[in-house]
Image: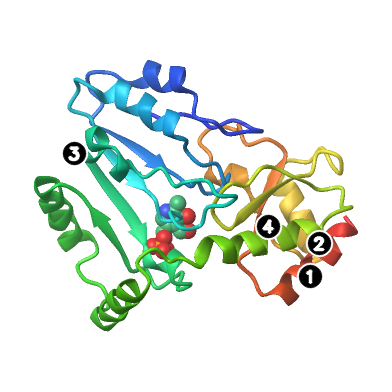
Amino acid sequence: MFVSLRYPDYAVDWDDVRRKISPRTRAILVNTPHNPTGMVWSADDMHRLAALVDGTDILLISDEVYEHIIFDGIRHESLLRYPELRSRAVVISSFGKTFHTTGWKVGYSLAPQPLLAEVQRVHQFVTFTVHAPSQVAFAEFVRRDPCAAQLPAFYQGKRDRFLQLIDGSRLAPLRCDGTYFQLLDYSSVSGESDREMAMHLIREHGVAAIPCSAFLYEDTGGPVLRFCFAKKDETLEKAAERLRGV
Ligand SMILES: Cc1ncc(COP(=O)(O)O)c(C=O)c1O
């Protein structure tokens, strides 16, 4: 079962979540900050989730890989902050996002011991192992900077620079509270589907973006493309110059 996030704010529709929970529901998957929309769960979202799972055996699996990439002073609402959620949750994060090593595929999960034993069992047969020297290096990085203190300001700077550079473009930015992805609304440029628009941008302007529909179960993403601003400033400048010409 999927709960669709809908353009333009992609907020969680809690009535829809309630409708889709049944006695057969084993687990709910959460992702905050959310890729591709940049939407971030609030404390209210967490309370609503807690109310819905209260009195059930539903487990929670929370993908929080962008936990440190969150902007404008907003607090990351991890499931770990809420004892009633933490006690039934597996929280997953990624050193790839936190230490600029995306693609290295080294991360971690936190859960109560009985749940973690199940995670380890699955890990043993699905992933088997990860590159141990990288794990040692990441452990050292975590010791030096457990909260990845520079990360929000670093990526907020990238987001703001990108937005400033595309100012005057016909592509309109949507709100981005977290992740390193910015959605741009192209409805004043074209009525094409997001896949067609993405291909058009690549062919005619040499800028690659991801159509949101690639992530979605239902077509609720709206006329938007996802742009990654985790790039060198020169790359952002070149891309923005091209995007201003769209
Ligand atoms: C929401 C989300 N979860 C998990 C991952 C996987 O992260 P990693 O490749 O660092 O393991 C990604 C990567 O893009 C992601 O966006």
Secondary structure of the residue carrying numbered label 3: loop
Please state which of residues 215 and 107 is positioned toward the viewer in this rendering: 107
Q: Which residue is mark 3?
A: 87
**Which residue type does callout 3 highlight?**
Ser
Q: Earlier in the sequence, mark 4 or mark 2?
A: 2
Relative to 197, residue 15 above or below = above
Residue 14 pos. (x, y %): 44, 22
Marks 4 and 2, Cα distance to the nearest angstrom?
A: 16 Å
The mark lying in front, picked from 4 and 2, is 2
Q: Earlier in the sequence, mark 4 or mark 3?
A: 3
Please identify, in this view, whether the residue under mark 1 or under mark 4 is nearer the observer.
Answer: 1
Residue 60 in picture, x, y percent from top left:
27, 38
Mark 4 lies on residue: 209
CB under 8 Å between discs 2 and 1: yes
Q: Residue 229 location, x and y as percent?
A: 65, 62
Mark whose residue sits in front, 1 or 3: 3
Gap between marks 3 and 2, in whole Å? 45 Å
Inspect the image, locate mark 1, and give the three-letter code of the amino acid beneath it: Glu
Per the model, the C-alpha gap separating discs 1 and 4 is: 15 Å
Question: Is residue 179 toward the left or the right of residue 108 in the image?
Answer: right
| Residue type (three-letter) at the residue carrying disc 4 | Ala
Find residue 165 and name its label: 2
Three-letter code, disc 2: Leu
